[in-house]
Image (cartoon, rainbow, N blue to C red):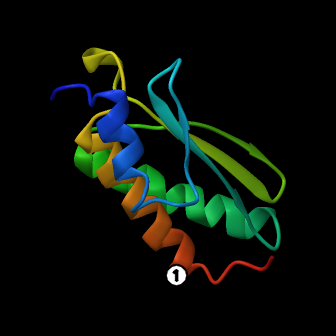
Amino acid sequence: MEKLSPESAQAALADLPDWQYDAERSAITRRFRFADFVEAFGFMTQIALAAEKHDHHPEWSNVYNSVTMTWTTHDAGGLTERDLRLARIADAAYARCAPQP
């Protein structure tokens, strides 16, 4: 899988408005908020299963009711279409969780 150019990465983010592009790392990051730890952990479980299915895993952290997730492809040296696909999966899973602001 080929690394996206910075221009292609920025253009792809039009589809992913809640994600931030880090040009230095060639990665995208988003913070997800939930009502409580149980909801956050349930979301992480969904993403873990999707990550295994796609054989591609996020960098992430969890603090109580928030999950910060980063996608980049180390083998390609940065952001790829695979990262964008998994970010869309994460967005869809988050929408199904009916998170509380």
12 relative position to 98: left or right: left
Q: Residue at image x 46%, y 56%?
A: 47
User: Image quarter for residue 74?
Assistant: top left
Quadrant containing the N terminus in the rendered view: top left
- Of 8 and 91, nearer the camera is 8
Residue type, label 1: Arg
Q: Residue at image x 70%, y 78%?
A: 99
Q: Residue under circle 1? A: 96
71 relative position to 100: left or right: left
Q: Residue at image x 26%, y 19%?
A: 76
> Residue 61 at x, y = what percent?
68, 39
- The relative height of residue 20 versus residue 78 in the rendered view (above or below) is below
69 relative position to 64: left or right: left
Quadrant containing the C terminus in the rendered view: bottom right
> Residue 25 at x, y = what percent?
50, 20
Q: Provide the secondary structure element on which disc 1 rests.
A: helix
- Of 57 and 77, nearer the camera is 77
